[in-house]
Image (cartoon, coloured by chain):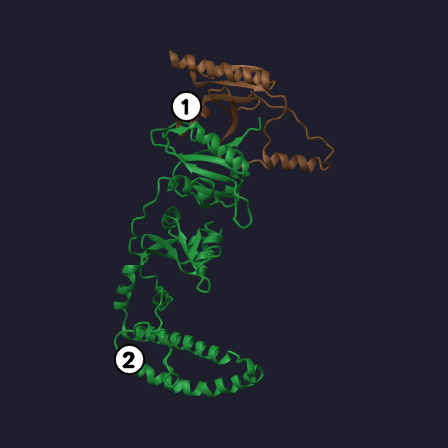
Chain colours: A green, B brown
Amino acid sequence: MTSSTSHAPLRISKLAGRYLIFDIDDVMYLRRNHNMCSVFTGTTPQNPQQNVFMGLPLELMPEEVKVLVDKHVAYVADDAAFHPARLASLDAPSRQAYLQTLKDEGRAAYQEFVDQQRRKPKPSQVKAKNKKSEPSSSTESPRKGTEDEEEASLFDSSPAPTPADPTPKPEAEPEGYAVTHTTSSLLLTQQPPHQQPITSPIPSPAIEVPASYPLYAHLQHKGYYMMPGLRFGCDYNVYPGDPLRFHSHFQATHHGWEEEITMLDIVAGGRLGTGVKKGYLLGGAVSETHTEHIDGNDTGRGVDITASHGKGGDGTIPHVRTFCIEWAGM
Amino acid sequence: MSDSHHIRHLVDTVLDNLQYQHDWTQLQVLTHSPVDGSPLPRPLISGLPLRRLYLHPDDQLEMLKAHPKPEDRLPETPEIEWVLPTHLAEKWSLKSFASVFDSMPAQAPSRPERPKRILLATIHDDSTIVYYFMHDGLVKPRQN
């Protein structure tokens, strides 16, 4: 794996208690280098009713966020607080540039809309339309340039971006749509690239992880990919590689070191796991009072994954013991 | 008192089942560790099944490579298995399972490491017994 320090810390937005990633490059980086896939939660605007194909943002589990923050791969930004704070701290040129970007985007969106309207073929004149559209757009562009400057000076006097107004303006004054950004990404990219991200030294908000965190961290450290386990009645679905390439190996359920496990749960889990070609994995952190053989775990066959994904020993990984259950076939 | 009686009963039931239903041989009950003589958390049964019960998927892969022709029968030398008798109404924990594994004796003088798997025998009141493998650590599932 590539060194995690070679990549600038990822920005994880905390919004309404959920940890989200809005940048597709970050999503790809996590998937390639930190064996995390997580779950896309964004709907597609063209078809908001379906939930089979989801898009950005990516929602990370708190366990994943904690692992990333502990490895200094990412930091958590409270976006609700960040956005107004960043807006207030903009100096005049960057503020001007920000407003200009918003205007440019609004105008581009409006232009797109106009072009689409124009391109819409009337049944009678489909042929004529294609020839006509080219010259009309070329005559329009120089006129648009002069208006750009006018608007920039106009807008300078008004202190805040205008609220969203989805109705298209008449073509006499192509001001463009007022764009309301759903993320703060525009504010982020305006930072000079040589500067460190301003938010990284700020301590991340405390991450509340579920009790199953030790098991997650243990498996994550070994290079497994974890997905939510609801489908198989467990805490995590554990994949030996990217879930697009591999069948999952385990359904993992966390238990406390001395927490009582009913035998029926083991039998049911083992039965279900074997039925779907998985192992039922029980695991949990060894409590501090337990000082016996700590060499017991993870020698033998299980380590081939560790070897290929070998990471520098990180002291923050809790000591976890795991047991795998399969039907014996008798 | 009643507890040890109950456990002895479990052991006997599983022993009978292994011997008469599954035709295991060389059945033995181990109540004390052969290393230091301390009592095991629960008596273990060891025995030799008729056929090989467990084959690790990696070993299976190598065997298939070594015997590419399907008409070649895979070698089936049975291995000694260790059985942990339990009752369905019991409550176990990670700690108690770990103590069972940690107390297991070495398989043979030639193989000093302790076994990494047990056969979990669970008895129900209607005398049904189900057998599940339990592995110590992350062991990938078989391609059954």
Q: In which chain is the residue bearing label 1?
A: B
Left-right relation of A297 to A93: right
Q: What residue type is labelled 2?
A: Asp
Q: Name the residue under label 1.
A: B90
Left-right relation of A103 to B140: left
Q: In the rendering, at what x and y percent does residue A264 appear?
A: 44, 29
**Residue at position x 68%, y 28% in the image:** B75
Q: In which quarter of the image is residue A107?
A: bottom left
**Looking at the image, which is closer to me, A50 or A122?**
A122
Q: In which quarter of the image is residue A314?
A: top left
Q: In the rendering, at what x and y percent does residue B39 appear?
A: 43, 15
In the rendered view, would you say A24 is above or below A282?
below
**Looking at the image, which is closer to me, A9 or A30?**
A30
Secondary element at tag 1: loop
Quarter of the picture holding the C terminus of chain A: top right
**Looking at the image, which is closer to me, A55 or B115?**
A55
Report the residue that reaches farthest toward the front: A124
* Marks 1 & 2, CB-CB < 8 Å contact: no
The answer, for residue A66, to whether it is visible in the render is: yes
Q: Which amino acid does label 1 sit on?
A: Glu
Secondary element at tag 2: helix
Q: In which chain is the residue bearing label 2?
A: A
Pointer 2: residues within 10 angstroms few (<14), some, or many (20+)?
few
Q: In the rendering, at what x and y percent does residue B77 appear?
A: 65, 24
Q: In the rendering, at what x and y percent does residue B34 appear?
A: 48, 16
Q: How far apart are marks 1 and 2 (CA)?
A: 75 Å
Numbered circle sitting on residue B19: none
Numbered circle sitting on residue A156: 2
**Residue at position x 53%, y 24% in the image:** B112
